Amino acid sequence: MLQRHFTNLVGWMNGAGVVWVFALMFLICADITGRTVFDSPIRGVTEMVSLSLVACVFLQIAYAIHRARLTRAEVVVNKVQASQPVLVSDWSAVLLGVGCLIFALLAVGAWPDFIRAARTGEFAGVEGIFTIPVWPIKMLLVVGAAVAALECLRQLVGRLAESARLGGGAAASMPRLAALIVPVLIVACVAILWAAGVEQRTVGGVMIAMVLLLIALGMPIAIALLLVGFLGLAILKQDFGIATRTLALAAEGTISEYVFAAVPLFVLMGLFVNASDIGRDAFRAAQRIFGWIYGGLGVATVAANALFAAITGISIASAAIFSKIAVPEMVRQGYTARFAVGLTAGSSVLGMLIPPSLLLIIYGVIAEVSIGGLFIAAVIPGILLSIAFAAGVVLMAWLTPGFVGDVDQARADTESMSWLDVLLGILPVFALIILVLGGIYGGVFTPTEAGAAGAFAAMLIALVKRRLDWAKLWEVMRETGQVSVTILFLIIAASTFSRMLTLTELPQDVATFLGSTGLGMFGFLAAYLVLLIILGTVLDSTSILLILLPLALPVIGELGGNLIWFGIVTVVGIEIGLMTPPLGLSVYVIKSSLDDESISLGTIFAGAFPFVLITLAITILLMAFPGLSLWLLGL
């Protein structure tokens, strides 16, 4: 009975957070309308939205844990699962215990600040113009963290019961002891560093090794970053109390900025676009336009992905949609399944490069550079990569017919479609592109406002096309909340880890060392690209960005590089990891979306390999010629 009530509480809290995120879209759109049409903006929108982000994350975090939505690398765990289920079950219990500890520390650290804010009447805004009390937000942080800790504890009890059912006696004793090796080693390592009083740079190096180990062993990436950041701060300050308060401050202050609202709003826009079947319409229009080319159906897939990318900004959305739209059609018309799925995986990476890109937004916030500038800088590289993919498709169709398939059949079987249908198919796409990107480049919208306006417009398109009912609307809202809380909580965790690294002065030392080695910019970029690709085999794009940037940005500054150009290079390099084993997130999304046992992960990876090479070549080209990214900015 108690467990059922607790599960209902988690669900209700998530529902409140979901509705809150949806309401932000209307609030920001109302502010835009009031400002541009009536010259009367809504007061306090910036403060309300900024504070709302913290509340929304901690209202939904327990549900994200309940649904196992926190990002993690499961390669090692999955390999061990078949041979050592007891070990994996016990290790999962250890991870849940760590999660319970971290969220309990967050609640404890945030409690004094909540009490102080309630007693003093602390507010955000400008007195006499607009004020809003902050104690309710701080209270939701405390409550949300406490409920998340209890959810971890609930799952921990269930996991221990499962371990007991899996086996007992001497046969299971060794795996159970093995599950405790890592936590014991971590405790011993922290004790030694604390007692020995080693220099701070050594602490930084050990903490980096520790976080990579924990991520490789399947700990949720955000939890690993929070745990190691907390331990590093405690060692550096020789005070667990300071580390706990810093943890709470990062949870409250990191994402309480207006620009971070762009994350849920662009996610919402992408999901509304998905619901409205704009991707299908764009593919059919591209099929009609490019069908006459030898290999034209493959070119149409690239073109449709590029158009779809310009209104969503999420690679995974493109992979999920076009695996259901393009792959069956290409296979039906004679293309090999290997090529069809490989092309879909390859062209999906355009979603994180062609603006508006969610990854560029996150990079812009972390690197403190103009998001609008990043969007402009990504235009030429995005077009260049699209053309390279299309040219690659045509060349492969001519040179490797065994790999591509019966292209002549596809040309003969191209579906007829009137030019009016083509126009009607791509009109919503161009309308959203003009609204979002035109609004940003024209100075009408900030990126956050563009996300709200784009999400509202995409919702209207879905309603006009009668593709959105109440059930679908709730599904879109709920998925928006879960994707957003995963990303924003990861940003909070990365901020804690970055603060710890900054105190060790290790990033600055690395920058100084690399600047004095004589490798130069290109030598550093070559090593950086290799690291991006290696991490891309086991981590998702956002995690790579958040882990590497604290180390890489000081080096670029030391070497005199442009941070906007570096952002474009980083995003393209990271996207290679979406197509490479063993993780290859786009590949896994395509596999799950197709639900076809005849198409294996190996088939998709093999089909995507030519596009990995094309993306790598374009990345190197962008490294060698920064002007390709900076030309439209006049730099």
Image (cartoon, helix red, strand yellow):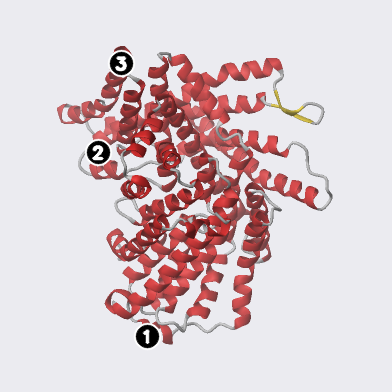
- Tell me which amino acid carries mark 1: Asp
Residue 403 location (% of width, % of height): 29, 74
Pointer 1: what residue? 408
Q: Is residue 98 left or right of residue 21?
A: left
Q: Residue at x 57, y 56 (%)?
A: 634
Q: Which mark is residue 478?
A: none
How packed mark 1 is, by other alpha carbons closer than 10 Å (few <14, some 14-19, many 20 or more), is some
Which of pointers 2 and 1 lies earlier in the amino acid sequence? 2
**Observer able to see residue 516:** yes
Q: Secondary structure at mark 1?
A: helix
Q: Secondary structure at mark 3?
A: helix
Which quadrant of the figure has residue 509?
A: top left
Which quadrant of the figure has residue 27?
A: top right
How packed mark 2 is, by other alpha carbons closer than 10 Å (few <14, some 14-19, many 20 or more), is some
Q: Secondary structure at mark 2?
A: helix
- Report, in whole angstroms, how far the alpha carbon at label 2 lies from the one at label 3: 31 Å
Q: Is residue 526 left or right of residue 477?
A: left
Vertical placement of 490 versus 521: above or below? above
Q: Nearer the viewer, mark 3 or mark 1?
A: 3
Q: Are marks 3 and 1 in contact (CB under 8 Å)?
A: no
Q: Which mark is residue 85?
A: 2
Which of pointers 2 and 3 lies earlier in the amino acid sequence? 2
The image quadrant where one finds the C terminus is bottom right
Name of the residue lying farthest toward the bottom: 412
Q: Which mark is residue 191?
A: 3
Residue 351 location (% of width, % of height): 49, 58
Front residue of 333/285: it is: 285
- Report, in whole angstroms, how far the alpha carbon at label 3 lies from the one at label 1: 69 Å
Q: Nearer the viewer, mark 2 or mark 1?
A: 1
Vertical placement of 521 versus 93: above or below? below
